[in-house]
Image (cartoon, rainbow, N blue to C red):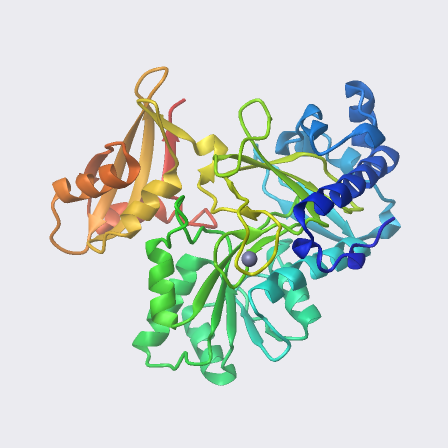
Amino acid sequence: MRSFREYPKSAFVDPARMLRLQTQWLRQHLAYCQAASPFYRKFFQKHGIVPRAVTLENLADIPLTDKRCLERSNRDFIAVPQERIADIVLSSGTTGDPTQIVYTQRDLDRLAYNERQSMASCGIVAADRVLLTCTIDRCFVAGLAYYLGAKTIGAACIRNGLNSLESHAGIIKLMAPTVIVGVPSFLRKLGNYVEHKKISVASVKKLVCIGEPLRDKEMKPLAVTRDLEAVWKAKAYSTYSSSEMVTSFCECKSQNGGHLHPELAVAEIVDERGRRVSAGVPGELVVTPLGMEGMPLVRFRTGDISFMLEEPCACGRCSPRLGPILGRKKQMLKVKGTTVYPLAVFSALDALPEVSDYYLTVFAADALSDRLTVTVSLRGPCSLARISEVLTARLRVAPEVVVASEDDVRRVVYNPSLRKPVRFFDRRS
Ligand SMILES: [Zn+2]
């Protein structure tokens, strides 16, 4: 099997040559799936797929694989014997039972290479000290990925993980990290906390942000991004991945979308019928991670809505870039013909300093339209009319706005039985 180490500069290769190379890598990947994955052996036979006849143009003829396939036939996706499995992670399922994703040692090497490429593109070097505020255990892959990437670059890792603000503040004071990896909303909280405690953050130059977007669909920074860069006086770079596709799209120094590593994945943005849409048009991100051994996938639906940027990047890389995640496909809302995602509503509310907390509820207005209700708690005097005006201007739809006490909003958002705060409630069915 081809080693991914052969193509360290593939993001810089001109697009025409890259398409030829990617076609070869794609065919090798499909041939491996056919030979080693019980699921794809049957799937290819059923759909008459011949790996050597597949091109990047006719790739869309291969039906999509989604999370439900992984859940239903989890074991059939495993393409290696037990003795080759080096790590097992869990991915949350659609029905409650988590799905197992297995990696071989070579998959972990690929992951390390991937994160090395990503982190190096935003300027992280061996002399950096990288504070990881994401978990490396609990069967998650994210923390492990950044750890392996930073380690491969030669940087020093500070694995403080999912810890309290106080603990991270102590670490920052003691170890003066130059890079912090974490979730933007948490890093904002941490930034405000260390500022309040008068702890110097002068060492911090870069924030690598995971799990939440940093930019809007015009690629302008969201309120959280402006706050982050102001409080830390550091650059915030967005990165995106998932445990199934184990391929990250990370922004380079130009902060203008996450670069695809062409040797590691074929990425498509598709419409409702699974057909590729043009650059700039939003659709669902579908990824074929190349060279995965343990649990190889073909045309995997991420469920995330984004768009591709194909114009050349100032950094010199020719690879296409992934825009911010605009929302989850199943959370797509339709209001009188206009598409809205909860994330866009949240970003608009985040930009209102008077709003202290909020949640969004969606109801079915009729067969074709949804009705949105935004419940907010307020930090200071603010009229409902102003909130409605800002939301309508940003979203092009007018949700109903309701004011509640901070306690009432927090009771709904922070359910102690759930791992994360929940701000979106779908009451359509
Ligand atoms: Zn770039």
| Left or right position of 132 against 347 | right
Residue 404 appears in the figure = yes
The percent position of residue 372, horizontal first and vertical second, equals 29, 31
Q: Where 280 sits versus 334, above or below?
A: below
Instruction: Give the percent coordinates (x, y) of residue 336.
Output: 30, 22
Number of numbered labels in the structure image: 0
In which quarter of the view is residue 146 placed?
bottom right
Q: Is residue 270 above or below residue 192?
A: above
Q: Quadrant of ligand 1?
A: bottom right
Q: Residue at x 60, y 47 (%)?
A: 242
- Furthest-top residue in this view: 367
Q: Would residue 403 be visible to someone looking at this image? A: no
Instruction: Say which of 416 and 344 sits in front.
Output: 344
Residue farthest toward the bottom in the current orientation of the protein: 174
Q: x%, y% of residue 342?
A: 37, 39
Q: Is residue 287 above or below residue 163?
A: above
The relative height of residue 147 versus residue 83 in the rendered view (above or below) is below
The C terminus sits in image quarter: top left
Q: Residue at x 18, y 40 (%)?
A: 389
Q: Position of residue 402 (x, y in %)?
A: 19, 38
